[in-house]
Image (cartoon, rainbow, N blue to C red):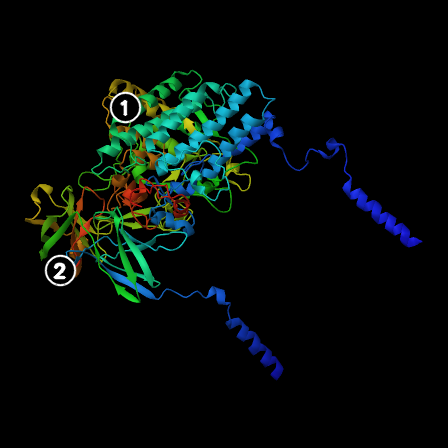
Amino acid sequence: MKIKYIYLLIALMIVGLFTSCNEDDWLQRTPKDRITDEQLWNDPNMILGLLANYYDRLPQLAGVFNTGTNAEFDDAMWSGHVDQNWRNDIHYGDDYARYWDYTFIRHINLSLENLDEYSVKLSDAQKKQFNAELRFIRAYVYFEMVKRMGGVPLITSQLIYDGSGDPSSLQIPRAKESEVYDFIYSEIQEIKDNLTETVGSRTRANKITALALQSRAMLYAGSIAKYNSLMSSPISTTGGEVGIPANMANDYYQKSLSASEEIIADPEYELYNPAGSAKGENFYKLFFDKSAKEVIFAKDFMTGKVHGFTYDNVVRSFRTDIEGSSILTPSLSLVESFEYLDGSKGTLKDKDAQGNYITYTNMADIFANKDARLYGTVVYPGSQFRNMPVNMQAGVAIWEDGEYTFKVGNLGSAHDDGGVLTGFDGPRNDDQYVSNTGFYLRKFVSESPQDGVRPSLASNWWTWFRLGEIYLNAGEAAFELGQTAKALNYINEVREAHGGFPANSLTELTIETIQNERRVELAFEDHRFFDLKRWRIADKVWNGLETDANAVVHGLYPYRVIRPGHPDDGKYIFDRMRPTRFRRARFFKMANYYSSIDPSVLNNNPKLVKNPFH
Amino acid sequence: MKKHILFIIVIISFIFTACEYDNFEEPKATLSGSVVYEGKPLGVRTNGTQLELWQDGYALRYAIPVHIAHDGSYSVSLFNGKYKMVRKAGAPWEAQLNDTIIIDVNNNTVFDVPVRPYFTVTNESFQHSSGTITANFTVNKVVENADLAQVRLFVGHSILTDQNRNEQAVNADLSQVVPGENASVSLKLSEALAGLDYVFVRVGVRSNQSNEFVYTQVEKISLN
């Protein structure tokens, strides 16, 4: 009997397997563990979340508070833990500054296509806005690639494999270097008027941001066209993947200038220069005041999304954590590139014409009457931090038998006479977490003690673009176009507003003046490496000579004079020195003008042409 | 107790065994030689210029960098096989990217790489008298479209003396240097160097086609 029921049950179950539910809707459920494309592309807030991810991934080489890479050029050296002393000994490999990020490009292309395909609920303006923002980010990424690699494959849509066994349709050859710059220009022209929802924003792209990218990118293209062909043997490939013909320079400079002038004319943006406080102080505050009208585009930080730049680089005795501090220490050559306010060259007067040390009553006196941006960028001996004097002194100089003998001690040590021997802030040669050059960094380093403590750290923002750069871009482009009066005007305005120079301080202009002006105004803002490359002087400035004052990072150490009974007793002298931890002169090879392409990329795409020298 | 010892021996013997897979055979063959022009090795900056070796027959291709010592010699450890050598750009000689050299490496292979430098320095001689070093030499032009960019005398206290590593160097007046004719340049030693027993000297010449010099062989000069 029982067995019959079991058969029946089995039969019913088999029948049950072949039936199906009539109502498809019942099975069609919205997944609870993922977001569908339809949901994403119809919700402005979710799209914004995606964009935040992309903005966060904007590439940099020595930007966004990148302490390490900034210690690899001539503006500073590494004074942090000895385990990274290789930065003071860096050999720029063939792959230095390589950037080849088609993952990011694919993500943007995919987003652009999905935005078109799926979004139905967004308004037309919103759709255009998001499309334009994505394309701005893509143009920025292409700019970052072209300035490091030369012409790269221009890919603007998803590459989909057809399964045929032949991948050659996915192998896109490199575009010409000029074509990538032209692509950036034409993208900006198409999108700039669609960025209507973000007018006035400092952290999302708007029309002014797009123009700022145009201003910078076109200036790069113009100077590569001009200065590459002025080299004794221009760097180029036969297909134009590297190198831009000289006759294209003027057009690029013109495009840069027109973008710069449009930004400068916009009343929403002005050079940061509040009345009533010192110029140097203003220049420092420019990077902390998030309402500054100078800032065009920034990467914001806040509680929960912080950076360790203050922890890394704060003056030694001002550190509020038990470790860190003093990592990035500016070089003497950077300090000396800040001119005197009377327009004379910035060389510090440490010795007189006979080679005798010049004595100073106060340490800060040797830095007196210099470009105010020096104070805003560098903490030098005798200056202040957090309204407190820094305690810098390398040692004492004892006068014996007609010459000085230098004596140094531990940090915070006292000499036999009861006075300071070595200050709490050094400088101290061959030591870690204390300045090895005699200078500390002030730019971007927060005055708030809390900003140097882990894990809360600092939340001042990173400026990708600011008006000061745009003025200098305009000045340089105008200069190259032969409009010298206009160029002088733009550059003098920055010098007056930020540097505290009198009006019209420059009356003549050379490319060297412009180069120096960019070095001091834009120090540590991720410009130096690329500027030297586009002017094609990187191999001359970083010439690898152990005797070169610029290729080798030097320091300047203050000593207190001990010479009882003499008027110089108790005054200070300054000694130029080469830090022991600085191992090798910076040497930029011709091969570094364009980084090598990864061999695995070349293996995958035989249509790619190698860069010269690789 | 005996059992314990046996166990320990067994365990220890396991420690000294290894998986076969991580025992790749190390490359036993060597390829060595010098970069030569007209049969003579060319001096270069140590760790400066490189040659590249490639091997065909594998799916993925990666270059093997070949470093050149200051005297122009090089040496690489390889497996036996057929390799292609490329004379890259960025060297003080002409790049010959399309004219690769095929080398059969079999145990110890010696191969001198012929290169065509933009310039050479020959007939060099160095004299020292009372703290001044004088170099006499002849600069020869090899590549027609190259121009002289720099001719320098380098002095150092180690055998690795070149454009980047030197204690003292001086540029020759280019208007006085005529290719094919005798030229000279002299340098007054700094106090630090003059006090030494000996110094190393060499002359380098750089063309406008490259940022690397080609050097004479380093010579040791006694100062006493």
Q: Quadrant of residue A500?
A: top left
Residue A143 drawn at (x, y percent): 39, 32
Q: Quadrant of residue A119?
A: top right
> In what element is the residue under mark 1?
helix
Residue A533 drawn at (x, y percent): 31, 36
Count of marks placed on residues: 2
Badge 1: chain ID: A
Badge 2: chain ID: B
Q: Nearer the viewer, residue A87 or A56?
A: A56
Q: Estimate the spatial distance between the alpha carbons at disc 2 and disc 1, rounded to whole Å.
A: 57 Å
Disc 1 residue type (three-letter): Asn
| Above or below for A17 versus A516 | below
Residue B138 in view, yes or no: yes
Mark 2, residue position: B223
Disc 2 residue type (three-letter): Leu
| Above or below for A159 versus B67 | above
Residue A342 in view, yes or no: no
Q: Quadrant of residue A385?
A: top left
In the displayed structure, does residue A228 sit left or right of residue B23?
Answer: left
What mark, if any, has residue A250 been given in the picture? 1
**Residue in view at x 53 percent, y 31 percent:** A111
Nearest to viewer (mark 2 / mark 1): 1
In the displayed structure, does residue B2 sit left or right of residue A406?
Answer: right
Q: Residue furthest bottom?
A: B2
Residue A185 drawn at (x, y percent): 38, 25
